[in-house]
Amino acid sequence: MARVRLEDVARHAGVSMKTVSNVVHDFPHVSVRMRERVQAAIDELGYRPNAMGRGLATGRTGLLALALADVTIPYFAELARMVSTHATKRGYRLLLEQTDSSLEEERAIVSASEAGLVDGVIFQPAAMSSFEIAKHRTDVPIVLLGEGPAPLSVDHVMIDNVEGATTVTRHLASLGRRRIGFLGHEQGRQTQTSKVRIMGYQRGLELEDLPVDPALLVASSAISAAAAAEALGTALDGGLSIDGLVCRDDLAAIGALRALAERGISVPDDVAVTGWDDITMASFTHPTLTTIAADTTALADAALDLLEERIAGFEGLGRHVMVPHRLVVRESAPSA
Amino acid sequence: MARVRLEDVARHAGVSMKTVSNVVHDFPHVSVRMRERVQAAIDELGYRPNAMGRGLATGRTGLLALALADVTIPYFAELARMVSTHATKRGYRLLLEQTDSSLEEERAIVSASEAGLVDGVIFQPAAMSSFEIAKHRTDVPIVLLGEGPAPLSVDHVMIDNVEGATTVTRHLASLGRRRIGFLGHEQGRQTQTSKVRIMGYQRGLELEDLPVDPALLVASSAISAAAAAEALGTALDGGLSIDGLVCRDDLAAIGALRALAERGISVPDDVAVTGWDDITMASFTHPTLTTIAADTTALADAALDLLEERIAGFEGLGRHVMVPHRLVVRESAPSA
DNA sequence: CGCTGAAGTTACAGCGCTGGTAAAACGTAA
DNA sequence: TTACGTTTTACCAGCGCTGTAACTTCAGCG
């Protein structure tokens, strides 16, 4: 059961280490007879190449890091799934790093104290600005996921949040809603995601000639259904009057549904509600959620494309890729 | 911006490589002056230790693999979060491997073709039997998560599924329900999880002197709310009559709520429903879900404890750790 | 029948780091 | 001042693998 090394196989087969290495990697220029002989030795000894040794010699590890706030947030779980699946298909394995949206953790991601462990990083920042990120890391290829303005030097994959938020807001307006609120952005320092979605929400209101009223913005203490439910509940109890509600994400929308239901407010009759992300659960809420669905497959693919090019040596300016999204209409804000 | 190696730092500081290494690792027997001098050189040059080099020299990588079916399944996302958080706290980083419950992928996990990449593996199998797993891997420490009978040779952390299922079943019985169904196990080959929960469900029925009727078992084509909703819908439309429903997991329960709502069947009045896992969403369904909550923190901790002991060299028989769970009563099956 | 070049194979020098151990420097007591 | 014990530092041999370049073999051709 002792560890078998390349050298052991080579000796056993009576060939050089390099030849064994060539067989393991299916390199050309190895005769069939030789290949068979070596393969037999490999099988017989149960040889398994050592990743560290290879990594040290090649400078590659086949590992990518995916850094995000929290995998239990459904959107991030779906993102992780997509990235993991596609990365595997491309021959990479995925290291999961959770930052909990903390500035400290995010800085740790970017200025990793270990070098050489991962070939590249896919990072969805929440607290750090893209500009700060751009300043730090230069040794490991990195692709940013997100929404905000991004520096020219860093690759970036995003969906057009302003446009998406404008779309849902106008959808609500098309249903005749006049007092449309926004729920779920952070109290205090906001993530870029929240900022741009609010921006789109306001643009939607303006395009529909509806008043932009700060009182209609309901912040939440956390990105969770519970926090959103509590925030909206408090606002409603405090006299907030709305007939439409754009939520920062599906989680907030789910919280909203609960807060509204508890107060006997009917969705969508009294208040039409929209979410964002189209998480699996959006089809199972009561009522089901109208929401914005990003093409996460395209997103994962685009991010990996950019990253692989960087790993392959591309050194140009940051590329910015926009991934498509679409409005999914369900019961919580049906078509007009 | 060229790569800085240990040797560069050593030369820059005018000391030996080993001394720099000692400083990096905070080893004793380094005078304060020397430490300062070396640290200055490190900072000045922006040195970052290379993980591969270290890994090759020490035989450790500081990486653990977590293998599970699919991170988008909420329970697994919560598991991944817990394991990742606790692993980080212990100085490890986490490699995420998704198997999609496929036998092939699971075999790949166990007989990993690469050696030396991870220090240990935490694996929640779905398709492979623990016994098959036990036969395979002997070179890398592994801890199994799950429910089934496990071979003596492998470490195993589980919750008592039979007991949990018995508890929910009896809870429904205590509400006066007589025709209690079970929803959500796989059609055809079942996972251990499903098997033991059905076992507990049957024991619960027996203890309450209720008939065990195979017609009350509704299998689902997948572990998802959608599949469960469809399965239950079909069964109901086919004449299934129940007044209580034990679901394999919260996802199945969420599907059940939808199928029942669509048919105008009231929960809990007409049918009381229970889930399993206490995912975040269980507090936000309509009605909220009565469910079994496992102590995932304890689970992650126990798994890491066992793994670290193995990594440290423990070679004894497999340990089997049982982690606590409790019944969380909510609206879908309230207290009597 | 020797020569050329392609195909197949090997030798060897690292990739960056650490563990063990030898050597040096230092401090103390006689 | 010398001998001796202790602390601190330096040296060296790998960890397992791959890239480069050099070598061998052999078919094909003049």
Image (cartoon, coloured by chain):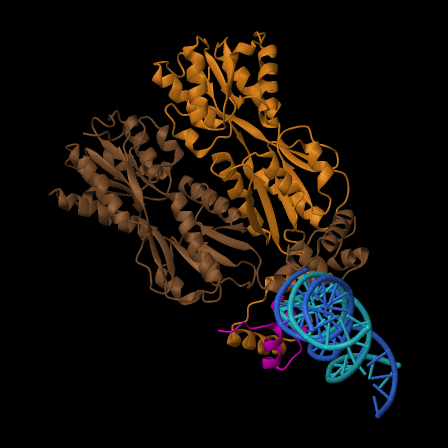
Chain colours: A orange, B brown, C blue, D cyan
Residue at point 11%, 43% (across, down)? B209
Asked if B173 appears above or below A218 in the picture, the reply is below
Residue B86 can be seen, yes or no:
yes
Question: Looking at the image, which residue is at 69% across and 45% down?
Answer: A141
As drawn, is A238 to the left or to the right of D24?
Answer: left
Left or right relative to B29: residue B239 = left
Q: Check the image and report above or below for A284 versus B95.
A: above
In which quarter of the view is residue A110 placed? top right
Q: What residue is at 59 percent from the left and 27 percent from the top?
A: A191
Where is residue A33 drawn, in percent x and y?
61, 78
Q: Nearer the viewer, residue B205 or C23?
A: C23
Quadrant showing the C terminus of chain B: top left
Q: Any magenta on residue A178?
A: no
Task: State which quadrant residue C15 falls in.
Answer: bottom right
Is residue A59 something that shows in the picture? Answer: no
Q: Is residue A25 left or right of residue B179?
A: right
Q: Quadrant of residue B227?
A: top left
In the displayed structure image, the side of residue A302 where residue B313 appears, left or right:
left
The residue stretch that appears in magenta: A1-25
